[in-house]
């Protein structure tokens, strides 16, 4: 049973980040890589995460409305409990935040959640710290408690809100607008093209010519039609220029705001939600290891950080190898872990067929994205094929992937080496 014990002499495989990429990588290593080492007892997998709990992050647009939307015991799970199945010496969890990576001397400095600091020397390192959303409502930007507090503050203002403005026409913005629209306004009848006189005005502002830029125009147009049914309107081809007060939607999720657009138009908002872009969590990484967009610059084929030294890798939204998407993360996990195994074997002196060749990651660039529009509609495509609304609801819209996370968090998804 895994406990919070650590060994100074262990070869630590440190994973920074405890979400989809980090937890999946840890399970795969513990199941299929460490057991294949001749000296497996000398290795220890260490997860360092700012949150002591994992969550189904895609569920935020619906979960932020009420705890009644999802069973909370399935939405949030303790990281430590997920790894109790392994030997106590093979896994260690640290609830803390990485503050400095010294890739030359191979150490990571950490601010521990209890107020102390620690420096850990690593044998191998996986950067999987993800990215933060501008709105604290839509991600575990800090820890579980901070997310819960942000939701609670937002919920208190929701019953009196009459005007809501959401910046961003990507999936997060559209899903949030649709969930709020159906919750607050209901849905128009079968023969209506839009909801007449919605109780709450909900406006999405996007700089693009259409919403959902990763999907074809016809699908985006269908989504806009579904939004109209729950009282959501869309303003296209214009950016948000400024918001007053400055911390509206970011530091204070429940304050009234005046949103000024680049065309000079102003929108009054009882609630403002910025859902534009994500910031890679790389403040602790030396700038020489970062790409122009702030993500960790890793080898797009092997996922290694070639310029950082041996046995350093990156995966997930924090890394440059692929666009941010959960299905691409899950595709990359076996490839990353196979290459880690190869590097560990090489360093241990193993030669010949036991090492094998590098596995190569190839990003699937086909049109793949599913976007629920409220509780019963949705748009999307998979592997280049447009999906009917019912199928988007069935796969994602019912519970925003919560049906998939049980096997992922527990490691059952990685029971077989692939």
Image (cartoon, rainbow, N blue to C red):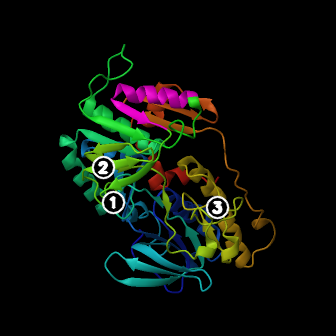
In the picture of the structure, the residue carrying the numbered disc 3 is 336
Magenta: main secondary structure equals helix
Label located before the other in sequence (1 or 2): 1
Which residue is rendered at x = 36% and y = 25% of the image? 229
Side (left or right) of 374 relative to 363: left
In the picture of the structure, the residue carrying the numbered disc 2 is 258
* Figure quadrant of residue 195: top left
Residue 18 position, x and y percent, is 45, 63
Residue 30 position, x and y percent, is 54, 65
Mark 3 and mark 1 in contact? Answer it, CB < 8 Å.
Answer: no
Side (left or right) of 120 relative to 246: right
Mark pair 1, 2: CA separation: 10 Å
Q: Height in image: 255 above or below 122?
A: above
Residue 148 position, x and y percent, is 28, 56
Q: Height in image: 251 above or below 312?
A: above
Q: Is residue 70 visible?
A: no
Mark 2 closeness class: few <14, some 14–19, many ≥20 residues within 10 Å: some
Nearer to us in this view, 265 or 283: 265
Label located before the other in sequence (2 or 3): 2
* Figure quadrant of residue 182: top left
Which residue is rendered at x = 39% and y = 54% of the image? 242
Residue 203 position, x and y percent, is 36, 38
Q: Outermost residue, front direction?
A: 264
Mark 1 closeness class: few <14, some 14–19, many ≥20 residues within 10 Å: few
Mark pair 2, 3: CA separation: 46 Å
Which residue is rendered at x = 61% and y = 50% of the image? 331
Side (left or right) of 200 relative to 136: left
Nearer to us in this view, 206 or 224: 206
Stretch of the chain drawn in magenta: 218-236
Mark 2 and mark 3 in contact? Answer it, CB < 8 Å.
Answer: no
* Figure quadrant of residue 160: top left
In the picture of the structure, the residue carrying the numbered disc 1 is 246
């Amino acid at each position: 049973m895994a406990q919070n014990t650590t060994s100074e002499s262990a070869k630590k495989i440190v994973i920074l980040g405890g979400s989809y990429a980090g937890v999946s990588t840890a399970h795969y290593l513990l199941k299929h890589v460490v057991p294949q080492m001749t000296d497996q007892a000398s290795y220890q997998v260490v997860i360092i995460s700012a949150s002591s709990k994992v969550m189904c992050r895609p569920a935020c647009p619906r979960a932020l409305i009420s705890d009644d939307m999802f069973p909370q015991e399935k939405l949030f799970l303790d990281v430590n409990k997920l790894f109790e199945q392994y030997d106590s010496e093979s896994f260690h969890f640290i609830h803390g935040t990485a503050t400095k990576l010294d890739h030359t001397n191979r150490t990571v400095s950490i601010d521990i959640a209890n107020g102390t600091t620690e420096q850990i020397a690593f044998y191998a390192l996986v950067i999987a710290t993800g990215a933060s959303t501008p709105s604290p409502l839509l991600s575990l930007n800090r820890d579980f408690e901070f997310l819960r507090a942000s939701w609670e503050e937002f919920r208190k203002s929701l019953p009196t809100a009459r005007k809501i403005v959401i910046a961003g026409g990507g999936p997060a913005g559209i899903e949030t607008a649709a969930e709020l629209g159906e919750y607050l306004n209901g849905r128009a009848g079968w023969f209506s093209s839009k909801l007449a006189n919605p109780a709450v005005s909900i406006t999405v502002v996007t700089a693009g010519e259409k919403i959902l830029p990763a999907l074809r125009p016809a699908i985006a147009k269908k989504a806009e039609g579904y939004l109209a049914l729950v009282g959501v309107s869309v303003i296209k081809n214009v950016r948000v220029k400024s918001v007053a007060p400055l911390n509206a939607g970011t530091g204070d999720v429940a304050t009234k705001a005046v949103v000024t657009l680049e065309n000079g138009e102003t929108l009054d908002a009882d609630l403002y939600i910025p859902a534009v872009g994500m910031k890679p969590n790389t403040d602790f990484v030396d700038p020489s290891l970062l790409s122009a967009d702030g993500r960790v610059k890793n080898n797009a084929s092997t996922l290694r950080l070639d310029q950082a030294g041996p046995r350093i890798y990156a995966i997930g939204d924090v890394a440059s190898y692929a666009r941010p998407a959960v299905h691409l993360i899950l595709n990359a996990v076996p490839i990353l872990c196979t290459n880690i195994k190869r590097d560990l074997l090489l360093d241990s002196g193993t030669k010949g067929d036991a090492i094998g060749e590098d596995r190569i990651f190839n990003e699937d660039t086909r049109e793949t994205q599913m976007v629920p529009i409220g509780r019963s509609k949705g748009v999307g495509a998979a592997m280049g094929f447009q999906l009917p609304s019912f199928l988007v609801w069935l796969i994602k819209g019912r519970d925003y992937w919560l049906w998939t996370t049980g096997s992922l968090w527990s490691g059952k998804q990685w029971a077989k080496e692939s």
